[in-house]
Image (spheres, rainbow, N blue to C red):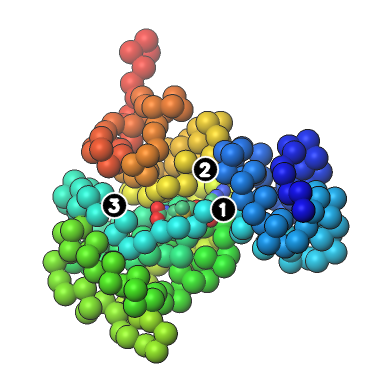
Amino acid sequence: MNTQVDNNSFDLVWNYLENRHGYDFSEYSRSTIDRRIGQFMTREKLSSPTELMHKLMADKMFHVKMTEALTVNFTEMFRDASFFLSLTRKVLPFLSTYPSIKIWHAGCSTGEEVYSLAILLDEFELLHKTKIYATDMNETCLKAAERGIYSFEQIKNYTKNYRVSGGRKDFSMYYEAQDNGVKLNAYLKKNITFFQHNLATDHSFNEFHLILCRNVLIYFNRNLQTRVVDLFKNSLNNLGYLAIGNKENLLFNGQRNNFAFIDREEKIYRKVQFIDKKL
Ligand SMILES: C[S@@+](CC[C@H](N)C(=O)[O-])C[C@H]1O[C@@H](n2cnc3c(N)ncnc32)[C@H](O)[C@@H]1O
């Protein structure tokens, strides 16, 4: 079966997905999308873009399956522990001065990162006054995030990460063991709202003190990265914080004048007021 990706032959499929369902993959990194669509078609036993198009038109829910297969959803709790350590040392003390805190967690996948943040906020006695908006384009991931159930194997790793991240308590106090894994305590998600939001097509929906969007921009091309960082800039309060993945960069997209480094290694920035000296 030949599932080799030919960009031109896929144009119809991309146009259909965008016009019919509002998904725009045109500005994703080509190599990631090509590889994943090839894998998806092999799995679904589809041998050509025409067959894929027929399937999309015949099965009303197939577009969800397809678009979800195109994104990388890997995540874990306290991923890059040094990032969370830096967040607690360099950002939470400033956030604590606000009477209430609003955080946007964009590209939250299955929720592990959001719960990590909720735990640290709780340990800094900030969770009760924080509202976290956790978004992703992938509905299946969001449903898993809302359930907050993770395997025993995962929790073993997360416990290690938690300690390195500066966690102050016994990690097991945050979950209850069940037959099929562990369920995080309900109070952690009391102030989290999970909902679908597509960074490529949707707009800002509030103003935030902190935006986290880690390991998402890396899948976008420069143009889309610039648009999304612009969306973040416009969604941040004055002096709001932005955290991106440690392999991602703002230098590429003309935004460096709008942000100052808080932690260069961990890619934590703060929005600055750019003063045009000519005025
Ligand atoms: C690799 S995961 C990163 C998860 C988490 N932020 C972390 O660093 O562990 C990337 C996530 O970005 C989401 N994503 C990809 N494109 C998106 C878009 N256009 N809008 C919103 N979310 C998107 C995917 O569904 C996936 O859950």
Q: Residue at x 31, y 39 (%)?
A: 267
The span from disc 1 to disc 3 (Cα, nearest Å) is: 21 Å
- Sequence-wise, the earlier of marks 1 and 3 is 1
Q: For the residues labelled 3 and 2, say whether their Cβ atoms are less than 8 Å apart.
A: no
Q: Residue at x 56, y 53 (%)?
A: 71
Residue 76, image x, y percentages: 36, 61
Residue 129, image x, y percentages: 28, 64
Q: Residue at x 33, y 13 (%)?
A: 277
The residue carrying mark 2 is: 219
Residue 254, image x, y percentages: 44, 24
The span from disc 3 to disc 2 (Cα, nearest Å) is: 18 Å
**Residue 192 occupies which quadrant of the picture?**
bottom left
Label 1 is placed on what type of residue? Thr
Mark 2 Cα shell of 10 Å, populated few (<14), some (14-19), many (≥20): some
Q: For the residues labelled 2 and 1, say whether their Cβ atoms are less than 8 Å apart.
A: yes
Question: Where does the C terminus fall, quadrant-wise?
Answer: top left
Label 2 is placed on what type of residue? Tyr
221 or 114: which is nearer to us? 221
- Sequence-wise, the earlier of marks 2 and 1 is 1
**Residue 115 occupies which quadrant of the picture?**
bottom left
The residue carrying mark 1 is: 71
- Checking the image for residue 140, the label placed there is none
Is 67 left or right of 253, judged from the image as shown? Answer: right
The residue carrying mark 3 is: 80
126 or 138: which is nearer to us? 138
Q: Secondary structure at mark 3?
A: loop
Residue 9 appears in view: yes
Q: State yes or no: Cβ of the residue under disc 1 lies below 8 Å from any atom of ligand 1.
A: yes
Q: Residue at x 85, y 64 (%)?
A: 58
Q: Secondary structure at mark 1?
A: loop
The span from disc 2 to disc 1 (Cα, nearest Å) is: 8 Å
Label 3 is placed on what type of residue? Asp
